[in-house]
Image (spheres, helix red, strand yellow):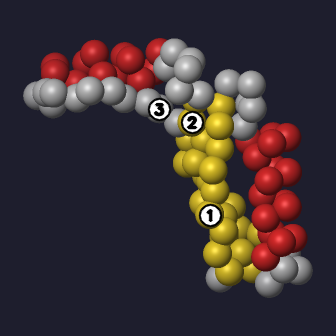
Amino acid sequence: MTYKAIITIMPHKELLDPQGKTVKKNLPNIGVEEVADVRIGKHIEMVLEAQSDTDAKDKVELACSKLLANVIMESYSYQIAQQ
């Protein structure tokens, strides 16, 4: 079966996000005011073959924890749907 995973990776809330801070600081320069915070992360879409929902989840979990996210500095979440 074919599955599609939508993966979101974000820096831990406790860590500084210099890229997000830079974007927040410069938003008023383009007329975007009153922004409380900006955090920059990654959005990944993965299409994969798996025997079951559990197998698909296991594959995505392994990819996230071992390759896609730096679990020391980032957290991740995902949604998986059969296509």
Residue 60 vs residue 37: left or right? right
Looking at numbered disc 1 in the image, what kind of residue is underneath it? Gln
Q: Residue 40 carries which label?
A: 3
How crowded is the residue under tag 2: few (<14 C-alpha within 10 Å), some, or many (20+)?
some
For the N terminus, the image quarter is bottom right
Residue 37 vs residue 15: left or right? left
**Gap between marks 3 and 1, in whole Å?**
19 Å
Looking at numbered disc 2 in the image, what kind of residue is underneath it? Met
**Gap between marks 1 and 2, in whole Å?**
15 Å
Looking at numbered disc 3 in the image, what kind of residue is underneath it? Ile
Q: Where 27 sits versus 46, above or below?
A: above
Q: Do the residues labelled 3 and 1 touch (CB within 8 Å)?
A: no
Out of 23 and 73, give the one closest to the viewer: 73
Q: Position of residue 38 (x, y in %)?
A: 36, 29
Tag 2's secondary structure? strand
The residue labelled by disc 1 is 79
How crowded is the residue under tag 1: few (<14 C-alpha within 10 Å), some, or many (20+)?
few
Q: Nearer the viewer, mark 3 or mark 1?
A: 1
Q: Where 6 sits versus 25, above or below?
A: below
The residue labelled by disc 2 is 10
Residue 5 vs residue 57: left or right? left
Tag 3's secondary structure? loop
